Amino acid sequence: MNDKKHIYYFDYLRAMAVVCVIYMHVAADPLRAGINPGWHGMNLLTCFSFTAVPLFFMMSGFLLLSSERTLNISVLLKKRIPHLLVPLAAWTVAAVLRKLYITGNQTPAGLYEGLVSSLADPAWVHLWYMYTLIAIYAISPILYGGLHSLDKKGHIYVLVLIGLVSAKAMLQSVLPDSLDRLLDVDLITKVGFFGNHLCTFVLGFYLGSMKRKLPNWLLVVAAGLLLAVITFGTYYLTQTTGNFNQTFQNQSAGFEVLLAACVFLLFKQNMDRASKFLERVPVVALSLSIYLMHCILLSVMLQHYTVSTFFDTVYITLLNLVICFFAMKTAATVKPVCFLATGMTYKAACGSCNWIYTYNWIKDFVNRWRRQA
């Protein structure tokens, strides 16, 4: 595969996924507040939004496991892992400082304790994704070598194992608690490395590499049915237990991963073309930094605004996205801050997303318009 080939449908998936991940965090509190008329709309969008993390893992899985550069340990240690680890470290410091401000423990000892604790547990809930992704990156050369040495039967075997992990999660969602122990198969549990996210990561490689196209109507129907099952299942369990129950929204295996796979293939088969809007508004290039910032910003926003209705969740989601976008676009324009905040080199940011990029794009547009006039 040509590593330089741009995968356009990934742009649309990333843009959608970053909006989804913000939305599901905004909607978390009002969904837990109890069922009301607006609850059902929030629940429906949240059930779809939980495809965001599986989609991020799938895209990373395809990009790494289809690139020969994955076998190059120097590339891994000097480029790929630092692009994740450095911004994780910077945003961990920001998260710890935010927590100290909330608790009023703004002391050097508090900072030290928070940073040490972050070595074992993420400083903010959403940062778990980075811990898992970096760990998977660390073993990606082994995964690449293993997968590319398999024959057809070997690939089928891997897909069967992935299927078993998701099948177990789906059955545990729909069967009564009394039957859960029948599904507690230790072998399947242990196959779900990295909390089952490794399976999703590898599944992305197979979905992205798949040559055969599935009928769009079939993917739409399957996605609709899966979304209906997740939405109704979440409502039923929430009503039955009296608390917001997210068993059906498991983003590491089961219904959500299958829904994400349908969405992945729909975008792959129908959206693999350039977008002028995403070129002009480069939210995709800043998606990682927006992800890293959004929860910390959300904690500040919720101090001043109470989210209780469907309109509130949409409004705060979009406002959070816009603020994060402009903040990270500005951070990417400041050379000493760029890599810390975004994981991108300053040169890459100037060619893809920061204010210098926008200035050059506007200048080129004006020059083209003048030539045509």
Image: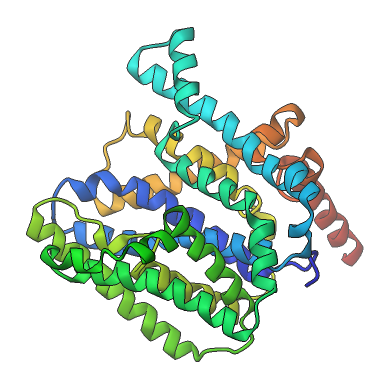
Q: Is residue 248 left or right of residue 315?
A: left
Residue placed furthest toward the right:
371
Q: Is residue 22 visible?
A: yes
Which residue is at the front of the view, 66 or 145? Answer: 145
In the image, what residue occupies the spot 47% across and 73% down?
Answer: 261
Q: Is residue 288 left or right of residue 334?
A: left
Give coordinates of residue 73: x percent, y percent. Answer: 77, 50
Which part of the image, by quadrant, shows the C terminus?
bottom right
Q: Is residue 362 visible?
A: no
In the image, what residue occupies the spot 33% across and 62% down?
Answer: 186
In the image, what residue occupies the spot 44% across and 63% down?
Answer: 191
Give coordinates of residue 75: x percent, y percent. Answer: 78, 49
Q: Is residue 280 left or right of residue 301?
A: right
Q: Is residue 343 above or below residue 180?
A: above
Q: Is residue 226 above or below residue 336?
A: below
- Res. 37 image quadrant: bottom left
Q: Is residue 279 left or right of residue 105?
A: right
- Res. 299 image quadrant: top left
Q: Count the marks: how many?
A: 0
Give coordinates of residue 335: x percent, y percent. Answer: 76, 31
Q: Is residue 281 above or below residue 156?
A: above
In the image, what residue occupies the spot 59% across and 46% down?
Answer: 134
Residue placed furthest toward the front:
187
Give coordinates of residue 332: x percent, y percent. Answer: 69, 37
